[in-house]
Image: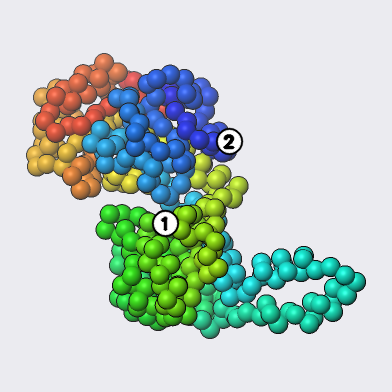
Amino acid sequence: MTYDIKIFNEIAAEGLQRFDQAHYTFNAGKTPDAILLRSQKLHDYTFPESVLAVARAGAGTNNIPVERCTEQGIVVFNTPGANANAVKELVLANLLLSVRPILAGANWVNSLTGDNIEEQVEANKKTFAGNELEGKKLGVIGLGAIGSMIANDAYRLGMDVSGYDPFVSVDTAWNISRRVKRVLDLDELLADSDFITIHVPLTEKNHHLIGADELAKMKNSAVLLNFARGELVDSQAVIRAIDNGQLKSYITDFAEPDLLRHDKIIVLPHLGASTSEAETNCAKMAASTLKTYLETGNIKCSVNFPAVEMVFRVPYRIAIINRNVPNLIGAVTSTVAEKGYNIDNLSNRSRGDFAYTLLDINDLTAEQAQSLVDDIRQLDNVVRVRAIKHPTLEEA
């Protein structure tokens, strides 16, 4: 079996090397089996019927029409945590820059002339005095892969750290230091924190998560950092709050015209994941999850379908995407029984309005597997079904 991957953007070579040349091609035709990308916007893209999956080498999927993909039975993958360390380090660096005028001091020194540079420095260095992070209160909104790392490392810097995340996972909870205080009320975090950093995905519900009302609850001396998504913060409300003395400063990784050239706002050129290590990690993770799905049907790190992993021990596996309605699995198993086959293993999970099923049947030939696929495809509410040949097992 050969799969063709349509590549958008420049993907790190270490990721592409995960696809062996004997079974994979890149951009070979107009009917790709999957798409691998970073920042390319696909909202106006017409997906060929052949596309089974889209994998983004990054955490956010705002550039992908996830809902449309779901309706078409296209699994969308992302790479949560692969760039977490890069973002964490950038946030910590900007916490330091927010209390110490390091850049201003360096620029000033480089502007000096004359033979008495040392004297000038000693006479004027008080102009660039700052503060320390130790003992200050940091509020982390969102305790996922990035937020939890920031919370832990900020505590090690001596900060008093609180975290707010009503949806924190069990895995994340195990990784957060017990000295990080979990806050159940966002208003409490806003009111108590000297620094607030946001690390949640952008959804319709949390668009402008931080607006005029939230800013009014913060300390006048607070610093707000946004390295998650620009739309999480109402920029106009931030500018008004700063100009009115309700907020000390704003640091963001997302450039907007109105934020530029304001002396209390630092805007970076979207540097969060811009390290060679992060790009490599994201590419490798995206390639691996995509390869696993194409070759085994197993799903991990999908943003629109449930995680389903089942050991693959038969020559052919049937993978089914369907609407989450009653009796669908019963209809599938009845179809299998009518053909006289015994099910060796089955795994079914749902997520919202859709469900995903893996079905293993012993001793199917290629023709039998395809015939079963054709019959299941005729069932109501089945969106996509395919037979997957085991990479190494041969037919009986």
Which of pointers 1 and 2 lies earlier in the amino acid sequence?
2
Q: Residues within 10 Å of mark 2 (few under 14, many from 20)?
A: few
Quarter the N terminus occupies: top left
What residue is shown with label 2?
13
Query: x and y percent of residue 11 in the render?
Result: 53, 37
Q: Amino acid at mark 2?
A: Ala
Asked whether, in this view, residue 37 is left or right of residue 44, the answer is: right
Asked whether, in this view, residue 376 is left or right of residue 55, the answer is: left
Query: x and y percent of residue 274 in the render?
Result: 56, 50
Cα separation between marks 1 and 2: 29 Å
Query: x and y percent of residue 14 in the render?
Result: 57, 38
Q: Is residue 154 visible?
A: yes
Quarter the C terminus occupies: top left
What residue is shown with label 1?
230
Asked whether, in this view, residue 249 is left or right of residue 50, the answer is: right
**Which of the 4 image quadrants contains residue 331?**
top left
Q: Nearer the viewer, residue 335 or 304?
A: 304
Point 47% across, 33% down: residue: 8
Q: Amino acid at mark 1?
A: Gly
Q: Nearer the viewer, residue 128 or 171?
A: 128
Q: Residue furthest top?
A: 367
Point 17% across, 39% down: residue: 323
Name the mark nearer the viewer: 1 or 2: 1
